[in-house]
Image (cartoon, rainbow, N blue to C red):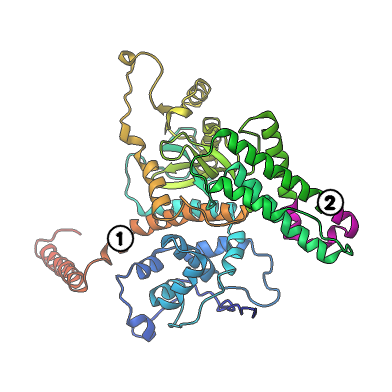
């Protein structure tokens, strides 16, 4: 099998978006592009300099060796990927075919060459971690507040020398699960996959050993026993338990063979990936054996995928998905901008995270929120007492009889955060995280939140609305404003009215 060649990443130097440009000296590439295209509008409105500064701060090879990938191309590719909900390979293909995406990435001319190999996006996600995304989100919020008109919920971060003790602003907090892209796990299927992986490890170790007799694994019989259960439409509890017992015995035999072979030739014969699988399948066997012996279906830190052992079951209690397999996030929403407060792979009670979200709000803005909107699970007596101690109004269903309630909360007041989750999951792919590593999955989720905030920021700027007008209507609007200013100046001179 021929080795595939990888596309070298572009190493063009980053040019600031505030670089001085003279009208009439644009490149032919810029002149023939539609100024109302969404990528053109977004490229002009995003704060590239600030984003690139945050991304570049965590690089460890400044001024050493060969220049790295253009930071705008790196971050811009992540934005394109999540805005269009594309895979890594498809993102690179789309960029090589779309001139507007190339303009968004800062290209000076169109090229049909790929900007990078798809595997480079994994390294970018490792560099764009939770800490960097949090800094970018805070920067986005500050820029958004400058573009926004004053309203009832507007808050300004206080100056360092003037810290306010007064609570300001509104905080909406909620939690959701981010399912990973894995098949629905069952006990017998998980043990079967572990046994198949153990067979592969046995073959690798046997080829490197001096043994003349191959270990007997009964892999064909184990496969037929599993297929008999998997293809049967309705299995009774007794049939499933018998199938689990057989697969556990096959896996136990394989693990004994692996231990004997390792004693002969040592662990150095296994590559890092194979060694990781060997540790995982031992853990899976121990968990499944304990559940089988005690006849139970739950255990702490339960592994549901041997390929992604960090994934855990999250019980949500929803009608269409009672259990989801992935991470659980706790998100704060302030004036329409989202902040990722917590991301955990183990299930937790989000009600215990309310105090942490409020303290993070104070760290970001310098004061506590004036009011908090949360779901029922956050409204424990301890949380109510904590909010009362800090002088924060809890806008939720209060305790006591309905007739004694004085503060009524509209059901739609928490709609912004529910709408945010809906947009992030349906439009930006948060309902199916396709990264396989724990670190890249966390970066995937955080990047989606960052992209939603960037899109909101670009939509708040005046140019984003004006640039969507047709060219003829835009020219007519400019002529009208010019004539209005001209006649107003004549009127003020004639009647000596001060400006």
Q: Which percent across, then down, holds residue 268?
A: 84, 61
In magenta, the rendered stretch is 260-278
**Residue 265 in magenta?**
yes
Q: Which percent across, then down, holds residue 63?
A: 68, 73
Q: CA distance from mark 2 to mark 1?
A: 67 Å
| Of the pair 25 and 94, the residue shown nearer to us | 94
In the structure shown, which secondary structural element does the residue marked by tag 1 occupy?
A: helix
Q: Judge whether 240 appears above or below 56 on screen.
A: above
Q: Judge whether 11 appears above or below 199 on screen.
A: below
Residue 86, quarter of the rendered image? bottom left
| Of the pair 153 and 181, the residue shown nearer to us | 181
The mark tally for this picture is 2
Relative to 20, 314 lies left or right: right
In the structure shown, which secondary structural element does the residue marked by tag 2 occupy?
A: helix
Mark number, residue 462: 1
Q: Which percent across, then down, holds residue 466?
A: 26, 64
Q: Residue at point 41% right, 79% down?
A: 21
Q: Which dot, 2 or 1, sits closer to the camera? A: 2
**Residue 384 in magenta?**
no
Q: Residue at point 77% right, 50% down?
A: 254
Mark number, residue 259: 2
Classify mark 1: residues with Cα within 10 Å, few (<14), some (14-19) or many (20+).
few
């Amino acid at each position: 099998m021929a080795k595939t060649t990888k596309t070298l990443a572009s190493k063009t130097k980053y040019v600031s978006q505030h670089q001085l440009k003279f009208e009439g000296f644009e490149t032919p590439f810029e002149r023939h592009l539609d100024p109302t295209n969404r990528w053109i509008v977004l490229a002009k409105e995003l704060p590239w300099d600030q984003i690139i500064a945050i991304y570049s701060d965590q690089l460890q090879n400044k001024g050493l060796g060969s220049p790295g990938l253009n930071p705008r191309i790196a971050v811009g590719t992540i934005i394109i990927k999540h805005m269009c909900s594309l895979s890594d390979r498809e993102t690179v293909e789309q960029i090589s075919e779309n001139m507007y995406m190339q303009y968004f990435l800062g290209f000076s001319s169109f090229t049909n060459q790929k900007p990078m190999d798809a595997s480079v996006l994994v390294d970018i996600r490792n560099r764009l971690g939770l800490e960097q995304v949090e800094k970018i989100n805070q920067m986005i919020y500050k820029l958004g507040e400058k573009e926004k008109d004053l309203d009832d919920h507007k808050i300004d971060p206080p100056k360092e020398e003037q810290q306010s003790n007064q609570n300001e602003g509104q905080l909406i907090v909620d939690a959701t699960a981010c399912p990973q892209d894995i098949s629905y796990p069952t006990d017998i299927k998980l043990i079967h996959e572990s046994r198949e992986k153990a067979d592969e490890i046995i073959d690798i170790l046997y080829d490197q050993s001096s043994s003349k007799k191959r270990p007997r694994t009964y892999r064909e019989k184990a496969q037929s026993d599993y297929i008999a259960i998997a293809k049967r439409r309705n299995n009774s509890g007794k049939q499933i338990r018998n199938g689990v017992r057989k697969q556990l015995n096959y896996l136990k035999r394989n693990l004994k063979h692996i231990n004997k072979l390792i004693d002969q030739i040592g662990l150095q014969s296994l590559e890092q990936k194979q060694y990781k699988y060997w540790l995982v399948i031992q853990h899976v066997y121990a968990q499944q054996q304990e559940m089988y012996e005690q006849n139970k279906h739950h255990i702490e830190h339960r592994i549901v995928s041997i390929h992604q052992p960090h994934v855990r079951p999250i019980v949500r209690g929803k009608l269409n998905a009672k259990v989801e397999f992935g991470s659980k996030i706790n998100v704060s929403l302030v004036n329409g901008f989202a902040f990722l407060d917590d991301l955990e792979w183990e299930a937790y009670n989000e009600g215990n995270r309310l105090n942490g979200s409020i303290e993070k709000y104070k760290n970001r803005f310098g004061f506590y929120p004036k009011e908090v909107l949360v779901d029922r699970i956050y409204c424990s007596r301890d949380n109510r007492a904590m909010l009362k101690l800090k002088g924060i109004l809890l806008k939720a269903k209060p305790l006591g009889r309905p007739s004694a309630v004085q503060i009524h909360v509209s059901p739609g007041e928490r709609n912004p955060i529910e709408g945010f989750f809906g947009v992030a999951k349906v439009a930006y792919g948060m309902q199916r995280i396709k990264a396989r590593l724990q670190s890249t999955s966390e970066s995937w989720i955080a990047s989606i939140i960052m992209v939603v905030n960037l899109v909101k920021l670009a939509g708040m700027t005046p140019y984003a609305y004006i640039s969507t007008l047709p060219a003829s209507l835009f020219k007519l609007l400019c002529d009208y404003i010019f004539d209005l200013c001209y006649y107003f100046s004549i009127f003020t001179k004639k009647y000596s009215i001060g400006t």
